[in-house]
Structure formats: C-alpha cells, structure tokens
Image (cartoon, grey):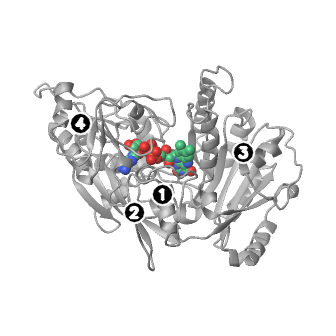
Amino acid sequence: LSSITHRMNLCSNLPLADPSLPNLGSSYVLSSLKTIHLDGHFNFDNIYHAANDFGNRHHYLPSAILHPKSVSDISSTIKHIFEMGPATELTIAARGHGHSVQGQAQAHRGVVVNMESLQAPKTIVHTGKMPYADVSGGELWINILHESLKHGLAPKSWTDYLHLTVGGTLSNAGISGQAFRHGPQINNVYQLEVVTGKGDIITCSETQNADLFYGVLGGLGQFGIITRARISLEPAPKMVKWIRVLYSEFSIFSKDQEHLISFKNSFDYIEGFVIINRTGLLNTWRSSFNPGEPLQASQFNSDGRTLYCLEMAKYFNPDETHIVNQVIESLLSELSYIPSTLFLSEVPYVDFLDRVHVSEIKLRAKGLWEVPHPWLNLLIPKSRIHDFAKEVFGNILRDTGNGPILIYPVNKSKWNNRTSLVTPQEDIFYLVAFLSSAVPSSTGTDGLEHILTQNERILDFCEGARLGMKQYLPHYSTQDKWQAHFGPKWEVFVKRKSTYDPLAILAPGQRIFQKAT
Ligand code: FAD
C-alpha cells in the first residue's frame, strides 16, 4: 500500500512535487484542452453554476465545463489530462444534477463534466423475463421512470427524490423505502459502462471486470465516470395506498418498523420520520402529506410531544382494490400505533414516487429551495438505535422546525457487500437523515451555524458512545477519518484507486485523494 499512496497523495498529505517534472502553466493547460477533438464542447466562461450545489455551502470554481455529446468526449478529455501526468493540477469531476451537499461534484480549477449533456444513446427498455433499461449515466431517474412506464415497467429501488442522475446516485447508494426489500439502487444494476481515470472505456458487470463494477458502485466517483447503466426493472403498479400513523413511544415505533421489514408480503415501501416539539401538528402534517381524501382524519394534536410517524405504501392495480384493502387491514392490525392517527391516501404510482418534486416546486416559488442545506445522513446499527434516539431526539435536538428527520430500518441481507458502500456491521441498521434547511444570514436556531453545531454534537455523541455508526453520503477532511470510515474496506479502496485512477484525477470534491503534482 505504501507505494500506492506514495504515487497518489492522500488528502491530508502535502503535495509530492517532483522537481524533475516541468509544472505546466494553467493557461497552457487550458489552451491544450481546446486541441481535443470533441463531438460536444468545452465552456470556459459560463462556469459559475458548477461551483455550486444543493448544499449551497461549498464553492470551488472550475476552469472549464465539458458538455460531452459522446462517451469518447469524456474518454479523450481524461486521456488528455492523464497523459499530461503530474505536471498539472488539473482534475475532473462528473457533475450529475449537482445535488451533493458538500462540493462532491466540484473540481477546483479543474474540469467539470456536465453529465446531463450525455444523452445519446437514449434510454432503451428491454422487456422479457428479466426486464431492464439501458440508460445514460447522466439521465435523471424521473425520465427513466416515464420511459419504462411506457412498457408497463419501472425500476425496483428508488430515492425519495427523482431529479437526480443515475451516475450520481450509483456513486453513493440510492436509498429509499424500498431498500429493505430490494437493497439500494446500487444492488439493482446489471451492468455499467465506465470511463476510468486513464480514459479507458470499460464495460463491467458481476461477471465481467467485476472488480471495477463493484468498486464503482458506491465508489464516490473515485474509479471512473459511469456513462451507461443497465438497471433492473419490474412490472409497475398503477396505484399506491399511502399510509401514515403516529406513535409517541420510540420503542413501539421501531419495533413495528422492524416487524414490517421482516417478512415477504409486507408493505412495498417503509419509512418513518420524527416530529419534535411541533404544535398545531395536524395541519402541517396533512398538508405535506397531501392525502386527498383521508379515510380517517382525527383532530390529533401533538401538544409539543415528540412523535414518530411510520410511513408505508402498498402498490396495487385498480382491479385489486378489494384484495389490497384486506391485506392492508391485516397488516395494520399487527401494529400498535395511536389508533386515532391513521391517515390513508390513494395516489397514482408516479405521483407517489415523484412526491418530493411537489415540495420542490412550492419551496422554489417561495425562494426556499436555494438555501444552505447542512444535511447529515447516518446509518445506525439496530442494537444502538435506542441509545441514539434517546440522546439525539430526547436531548440534542429541541425541535424539527429546520427540516424533516427520516428514520427507517433496512435489511443488510438484501444489500450486496461487495460494493464500495460502507454500512454498519449488523444485519439490520437504520438510515437516519437530518434534512435541514438553513435560513440565510440567520444567527438563530434556524441559522447555519446552529444547525452545524447540532450536527457536530450528533457526530460527537455517535463517536463517544461507539455506536458503530457509518455516514451515508460521507464527508471527511482527513485521511485518518476516511480510513476509519472504510475500515476493512480501505485497503481495497486504495488499491482500486491506484488501478483505475492512479493520478487521482477523478472526483476531487470528495476529498479522499489529492492529485499528485
Ligand atoms: P452529483 O451531486 O452531481 O454528484 C455526486 C457525486 O457523484 C460527485 O462526487 C460526482 O463527481 C459523482 N458523479 C456524478 N455523476 C457521476 C457519474 N456519471 N459517474 C461517476 N461519478 C459521478 N439519496 C438517497 O440515497 N436517497 C434519497 O432519498 C435521497 N433524496 C435526496 C433528495 C434531495 C432533494 C437531494 C438534493 C438529494 C437526495 N439524495 C438522496 C442524495 C443524492 O442521492 C446524492 O446527493 C446524489 O449524489 C445526487 O445525485 P446527482 O446526480 O445530483 O449527483
């Protein structure tokens, strides 16, 4: 390993300058980019949006944006930078939809690849016994949904929000309420086409170039740029029964969640969220749910209590309404929620999957979408979730006014352990997502500083109490912390980096490796 890390600086090390190599000036490097033959084009002026992301906190200006029209555009550009060797500091970051929160898709003075420009070939849906869709790495999941629905099919595993790209979510995991059954999105991919950090275009799968395949899945963009993916599909339902119920005891809430993810014919989607110190709850709760005609809607009032909302969905087709109602009744009868808090709604499948987009439109209209988002996503082992809930929901957090806090368990047995994704060591763990929005320039409890301090307190608690927590969408600033994050997977991760991106050209915004200069 030491020879690998010598060639490629780890993020906390000082650059290893080789005095025998000429250091090429940046204007020379940029003008050399203009010599690459492309189907698409570079942009050197209109580059400011690539120095921003959904997090709205990290701003690293690139030198150029590549708008590729073909995979060979990406390959040629990487090859060009690779062949210049350590003589330039030029790096390259794929940018999906730029919905990272900590600059992960940015490249300071480097080249940002606008993956959404790479649209050809279009999404192709293959029907048959094991249906799948071949899609561009820069395609948005919402477009894949619409395209596959034309064939009565849809991907199995989702994120809560569909205006994200395939390459962006497959570089992380892609987790939502279906992950307890199907695993995250990275477990529902048959094949990838990847351009490595040397510019090689490689097709990989479980049986072909498997090391690259598993490395890239959950690999934080470190080993290659995903230009195409083969996504597993299933028959799509037309409708969804969407249900929410409340609990005042965390232990009963989590017991019911764990029960629901433990058997086959359960709901198709299981999530949950925490409500702390909200009064007049019912109205906000219902309006965000938009339940249409709830079958039962009580005048339940939270009175500022901490409550836990279990959210479930069952897919069905209109001719199965009678049966699905019976199944739901039976499933609900096994749960111990507060009886007067059952909300049941019926919505088209697309509306259910695209639900967060509705909030996006409303927030954008109020100017509340492009604010700082100091998000924190954690994976907590089941055995310590009660300790976590007691301290975090009972002590550290005073309210949930800054944004939703999602919490739901998943089965690790459904997750493929060979990918680069790091999870806790237990069979069942919880995703806990603190999805805060900060009010710009506020110094109060809704301001950025306050939320960041709370996040730090949560992380400190997890570390001090040795919960065995792992960050999802991880962000660290030192090599030691990255190494601790990857644990036993670190050695393989570093080896893969030296194989597929030996000059550490790719995805510098993750701050794991630094390009040798
Ligand atoms: P970007 O932010 O553009 O890129 C992310 C990283 O991947 C960067 O390092 C980038 O360089 C790299 N990358 C991008 N494209 C490629 C490619 N083609 N090949 C290789 N590397 C690439 N996540 C979940 O798991 N579940 C959720 O429910 C969920 N909900 C979300 C809701 C919202 C409103 C937002 C903003 C984010 C949500 N996320 C969720 C997080 C999301 O999955 C990640 O932020 C993801 O990276 C965003 O995708 P993107 O296309 O914007 O990627």
Q: Residues within 10 Å of mark 3 (few under 14, many from 20)?
A: many
**Where the C terminus falls, by quadrant?**
top left
Cα–Cα span, label 1 and label 2:
9 Å
Instruction: Give yes or no for contact between labels 1 and 4 (Cβ–Cβ under 8 Å).
Output: no
Instruction: Specify whether tag 4 is near ligand 1 (CB below 8 Å).
Output: no
141 relative to 474, above or below: below
Residue at image point 57% right, 37% down: 375
Nearest to the eye among marks 2 and 4: give it: 2
Nearest to the eye among marks 3 and 1: give it: 1
Instruction: Give yes or no for contact between labels 1 and 2 (Cβ–Cβ under 8 Å).
Output: yes
Q: Amino acid at mark 3?
A: Val
**Where the N terminus falls, by quadrant?**
top left
Residue 220 visible somewhere in the drawing: no
> SS class of the residue under badge 4?
helix
Nearest to the eye among marks 3 and 4: give it: 3
Q: Amino acid at mark 2?
A: Thr
Q: Which residue has dot 1 on it?
A: 143
- At which x and y percent is residue 101? 50, 37
- At which x and y percent is residue 83? 15, 41
**Position of residue 301 in the picture relative to residue 226 (left or right):** right
Q: Which residue has dot 4 on it?
A: 6
Q: Which circle's residue, 1 or 4, is located before the other in the chain?
A: 4
Q: Which circle's residue, 3 or 1, is located before the other in the chain?
A: 1
Cα–Cα span, label 1 and label 4:
43 Å
Q: Which residue has dot 2 on it?
A: 123
Rendering quarter of residue 465: top right
417 relative to 506, above or below: below
Q: Which residue has dot 3 on it?
A: 274
Q: Name the one closer to the observer, 288 or 1.
A: 288
- At which x and y percent is residue 406? 65, 47
